[in-house]
Each structure stands twice: as C-alpha cells, then as structure tokens.
Image: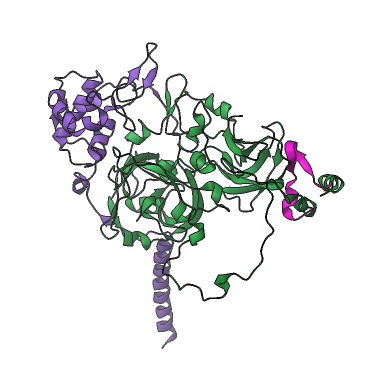
Amino acid sequence: MSDKHRDDVYQNLDQVAGNGLLNRRHLLGLGLAGAASLAAQPLLAAEAPTIVTPSWSKVPGRDLSGYGYPSTFAQGLQRLTGAPNPLLPGGGASRSPLHLMQGSITPNGLHFERHHAGIPEVDPAQHRLVIHGLVRQPLSFSYEDLLAYPQQSRVYFLECSGNSGANTAAQASDGTAASLHGLVSAAQWTGVPLSTLLAEAGVEDGASWIAATGVDGASMGRSIPLHKALDDVFIALYQNGEPIRPEQGYPMRLFVPGWEGNVSVKWLSQIKLTSGPANFRDETSRYTDFLADGKALQFTYPMGVKSVITSPSGQMLLRRQGVHEVTGLAWSGSGAITRVEVSADSGRTWADALLAEERQALALTRFRLPWLWEGAPAVLQSRATDSAGNVQPTRSAVLAQYDAANRYHFNGIQSWSVSSQGAIANVYA
Amino acid sequence: MSMHKRSRVIKRSLAVLLLCMLNAGIAAQGTLRLGQPVSEADLEDWDLIVMPDGTGLPEGAGNALLGRGVYEQQCASCHGLSGQGMAGVPALVGENNAAGEPLVRAVGNYWPSASTLFDYVRRAMPPTAPKSLSSQQVYQVVAYVLFLNDIISEEFELTHNNLSTIEMPNRDGFVDHSQVQ
C-alpha cells in the first residue's frame, strides 16, 4: 500500500478517541470499506493461500448423535480449572473461557463452577424441597411436583463475588480474561417463582428472611431477605433449555438475579422462613468484605456494574496492524447496561462502544468498537454504566473503599496493555 | 323443556361455570397446592440450621478437655494441632498485630457468633465425612476451638443453653448491608 493511499484511507476513518479508536458507526456497515483495506498488513509474512476442494467434501460425514458435542477442532474451548486441593475435596472453581467465546450466552458445559464440597449425584426421585419455619403449613415438594408449576424463563448473568479478585493484588498477574474474570457466565434460566411456593406455605407475620441450604457435602447455606425472595427469586430447573447441569445444582437451585452467585444455593433442599439471618459460615467467615477501619460489610448482595474487554485481552497477540474489533462484556446487578465506553490511551479519552440490542437487565451485554492499531503501545480499557446511573469505578477507587486484604466485589476497570509487538497483558493503569 | 325449567338449567349451568372460572383463576395464579404437608417435628433431625440466638441447637454439652481428642483425631491433620491452618486450609485461630489489626482473620478475631461454628462443623466438617460427628462431639470440638481462641476456659461446659451467650470478640465488627441495594 502506498503512503498516499494509506493516508487517504485514514482520513476516511472517523477517529473518535485517542490512539486509534474509531466511531462505532463503522460497525454498522457505514464506511468500513476503506478501513478493511488496512487490515492486510501482517506483522509476519503470510503464505499465499491454497484453495482446493477439501477431502471431507468427497466423503459422507459422520452419523447422528443423541447428544451433540463440539467439533474435534474446537475442543480447546474448555473451562479453566485449577489444581485440586486434596485437603479440600471438591472445593475450588472453574472459569468460563470469556476470551474464546462470542455473543452473551454461556454454553452449559462452559458455565463457571464454584463448589465447596464437590458435585453431589442427586437422584431427583428422592430429592425434596422443604419450605418451613415461619409458615402456616410446612410443605415438601418433589421434583415432579415442581415441574408441574407454571415456569418463567429469563436470561441472567451469574457472578461469583470473588470474580476479578486477582486484580486487588499489589502486583498485576499475567492473566487472561478467563483467569482474571471468568467467574461470570450467563444463561437462560427457567423455573418456578419462589413467591408461588411461599404463598402456598403461607408466610407468617414476623418472617423477614429465608435461610436456604443445599444437599451437597457441605450443605451450604445462605440467608436472603424476604423482600428479595418474594420479588424475582425462583427455583431454577432448566438452564438454556435443558435440565440444569449437576455442577449448577441438578435437579434444582435457587436463583437470585443480580446478586453474588453464592446466594443462588445449588442442590436446593431447604427454605426456612426466619426472623433474621442465620449467619452461616459463608456469610460471616467468607463472602464478607473487609473495610479499612477493621470492620467488614456483611450481606453485600448486588454485583457492581462491571465490564471487561474479552478481545484483545491478556496473553493474546495482535498479528497484524490495521483495524481490529475491540469487544467485551458488561453487566450490572442493579439493572441494564446503558453505556460502555472504551479507551485506548489509559483512560485519557473515551469513545462509546456499540451495544448489542438486547440490553436486558441483569444479563450480559456484548459491546464492540473498531480500533485502528498502527503498532504503537496502547492501554485498552472499558467502562460500563448501568440503568441506575452507576459508573464502573477505576481500580484505585474500588481499592480505596476496602482493606488491602479484601478480595470480594471487585469491579474496577480492567486495563490491557498492548506492546509494539502486539502482545497483550494485564496491567494496572 | 318449559321456559321455566330451561331458565333453571341455565342458572345452574351459570353457577357451575362461575365455580370453574374461580378454580381456573386459582390455577392461573399457580396455586396448584402440590406440596405435601409436613410438621416441624418431622424435620427436627433433618434441619441443621443453628441461629445466632441458639434456635436449632440439639440438646447436649461438651468441654474443651474432651474436645481435644476429637479435634486431634478429626481436625488437626488439616487445621494443624494449634488451629494454625496450612496451605489452602483456613486457620481456626485468629492473629492480630501489635496495633490490634487482623493479620489472620479466623474464629476468635472475626466470626461474629458462636452459633456459626456449631452450625458449620455439624453440617460440613470433616470434609471427607461431613455430618459424621455426634452432637456431643460437635459440642466438644466447638468448645475446643473456642478454647484455642481464648474465648472460653478448658473446663467450660458448653451447652445448648449457653452457646448463644458466648461473647465473640468481633460480634460488633460487621456492618449489615442487607438493605442497601
């Protein structure tokens, strides 16, 4: 490409913020033609492509299958699992490979996991959900019973309150979007509103909380204020159209939209109406947020407004100069995403990203913005705003609210540095 | 059919229709009433929740002198003989610096209520065989962990009547955010 042609093309691109961020209208098919010709500038010389009829086009393909599975060429798409700790059997977490996925729904096999005592093998025929405590009539429901009730379907994100906690550490770790932020996923969840079942049991005066426990080895429990339980909480039975996976609580889990994932108790078996919180281990010793003054916040439920650029992201490599799409996910436990801004110059200037149309409250929202990279070092960031007016804070602003040891509810802006060689890395900026 | 008879039939049909509509209205609201009634008495052994006020504690008692043996057999291999924890396993004994700031947050300097310790040990510990300890063993080992944290004496008899009265050092250390949305 001649310098003259190159300059002409650049002039046709509408740069809207520093370091090459382009107007989102380019993604709507308006004027990207010029930009596309810039894409052909590989950092490494590429071989000329060979166009032939492939061998698989000359034979019949494989047979049908009862349950589909990914292409053998796509089997690198895996959850990121940590090494098991023999002293904590079944503990730990696996993370969704955010940087390898598109859209805003997580396939069931890639939804993040967090277990405190492994995945129990629950026989639905023997499983019971008991509602008792401060109710007029304690009731026991079988799985079959619950399947008969009217169900509702909604897309919701689920996020562990420890997600992104690695970025509270003093030194930035060399992580990926998955290792740093993969404790968030989204699915279409279907189930029975808890309010329906509570109405049948008859909530007594004086009840102001529910205590929910599961039938895993730890019988993990959490307390939830009654007003939320009567609002949008439901018993999830289906995940993206199929019965929820064992690692998500088969045959049933509580689902508490927008709130830290731990309260959506899996393998749900008990809902006890109480006059106060039970102070379970996982709402006292764990899942409480250390403050600088020595105190700690308890019952911090809604997940803060957050976004992360999933591509380009940590440990990726830009293999050519030219126009790249910056894309990522944004979400908030307080409503819908109304705006995502992207910066390529460490937050000095920002440009509005294009948001996917759905923009459902308490779900993941995909954002995109074209970016012209000409080989100069850059720092990519995204900043989300929700329908309640909350704006995603900087890392330092979040850290200033807490004790240095706190790891929960970190929603600070993620910074990815881009080297002149095109290498992407997690940085604090 | 006479006009009179016909109007009676119509009236009766209307009444039946009205009943049907009422039933349909109930069904539409999802009140299928498929739950099987149970009594709280039936749930007593199954319900493991212990509230901060002691509600849900089984009858029983235990002290740290007897708890030491249970602890050394059931807990020490992971949590350490003195409750110091080890890599990947939480410490049970808290540690503060000279200024009183927490270095290691654990039962003695962080947990707000003794009920949590009983509740958690009974439902979740030990991880290889949760719910295998008897109520008496849970009282004993809870007493021992409280003793390790200098909260009760070695001889103190912990019971279902006095567990909720144990004053945990960090009982006022939490800010309730449950109503902050």
Count of numbered marks:
0
Decide if residue A362 is in sight here.
no
Q: Is residue A336 above or below residue B26?
A: above
Query: In terms of depth relative to the viewer, which is nearer, A378 or B158?
Result: A378
- Say if the magenta span includes residue A184: no
Rendering coords of residue A148 (x, y %): 37, 63
Rendering coords of residue A268 (x, y %): 33, 49
Rendering coords of residue A17 (x, y %): 74, 38
* Residue located 22% across and 49% down the image: B39
Which residue is at the far bottom?
B1
Rendering coords of residue B94 (x, y %): 32, 21
Quadrant hosting residue A388: top right
Which residue is at the far left?
B66
Q: Is residue B3 above or below residue A178?
A: below
* Residue located 49% across and 28% down the image: A169
Q: Residue A325 vs residue A274: left or right?
A: right
Query: In terms of depth relative to the viewer, which is nearer, B181 or A417?
Result: A417
Decide if residue A129 is in sight here.
yes
Q: Residue A301 vs residue A323: left or right?
A: left
For chain A, give the colour. Answer: green
- Looking at the rendered image, the quarter that the N terminus of chain B falls into is bottom left
Which residue is at the far top?
B98
User: In the picture, which chain is purple?
Assistant: B
Query: In terms of depth relative to the viewer, which is nearer, A8 or A338?
Result: A8
User: Magenta region: which residues?
Assistant: A12-32
Quadrant hosting residue B133: top left
